[in-house]
Image: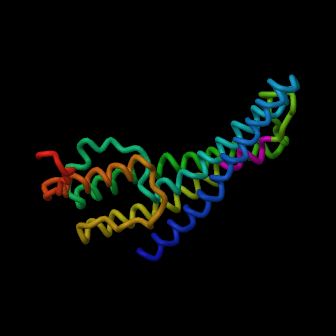
Amino acid sequence: MESYIRFADSLSAWFGKVFGWCVMVMTFGVGYEVFVRYVLNAPTPWAFDLSYMMYGTMFMMAGAYTLSRDGHVRGDFVYRLWSPRTQAKVELVLYFIFFFPGVLALVFAGWRYIGRSWRYLEVSVMSPANIPIYQFKTVIVAAGILLVIQGIAQVFRCIITIRTGVWPKPAEDVEELEAILQKEGAAALRHGSEAVDVVTPKGQSR
């Protein structure tokens, strides 16, 4: 199980980080559009299509990566009060009740959806540029398959936690600034009772 978890985490991280570069393409595209629209008075017909395709691709392909790093939103006001074993048991049940049915529905429905799109080589109706979008819709199935692979790894994590009482530590990765500040704040609180030397300038009383 641990070897599969490492494989799934690595696969999800690779795809997530590769497709994370979509934000750069989107940024340059939108920046170029702003320049030519407001400086040269010559707006492009493709900037809107580029922005939603890049954002959608990045959002979908980063889902499994986010799941592997336990980064999805969770209503943890109750969850965090439970022991790791209780957390793992609840998560294990919820994966089979909600996660896998939803993701598998995404894959099978998306397969038919993109099949129609590829058959007539669908183009965008959102702008006069008629940009092809059938390849963009393929991301739906690709993201779903990645989520299934990562979901199995998360089930294995739950099983290991039920056995050991400790969640397997995820791979070291980038952190949001908020998480870093929270850790620093917790460290400061732990050392708050320690003595602090106060330096008083000469000629002044404490």
Q: Which of the two residues, 48 or 191, is positioned nearer the viewer here?
A: 191
Name the image quarter holding residue 114.
top right
> Which residue is at 34% across, 57% downward?
92
Q: Seen in the image, is 57 located left or right of residue 144?
A: right
Residue 135 shown in magenta: yes
Residue 120 shown in magenta: no
* Residue 109 visible to an observer of this rendering: yes
How far across and down, in percent of the image, does residue 75 sit? Answer: 32, 41
Q: Is the magenta stretch mostly helix, strand or loop?
A: helix
Report the magenta residues as a range: 133-139
Q: Tell which residue pokes out farthest to the front in this image.
A: 203
Q: Which of the two residues, 42 or 113, is positioned nearer the viewer here?
A: 42
> Which residue is at 46% across, 54% downward?
67
> Which residue is at 41% across, 65% downward?
170
Image: 144 above or below 152: above
* Residue 111 visible to an observer of this rendering: no
How far across and down, in percent of the image, does residue 47 sit? Answer: 78, 34
Q: Seen in the image, is 199 located left or right of residue 16?
A: left
Q: Give the mark count.
A: 0
Q: Which of the two residues, 200 or 184, is positioned nearer the viewer here?
A: 200
Q: Which quarter of the image is occupied by the N terminus?
A: bottom left
How far across and down, in percent of the image, does residue 117 sit? Answer: 77, 42
Q: Which of the two residues, 202 or 53, is positioned nearer the viewer here?
A: 202
Q: Seen in the image, is 155 located left or right of residue 59?
A: left
How far across and down, in percent of the image, does residue 135 sit? Answer: 77, 48
What's the image's color scheme?
Answer: rainbow
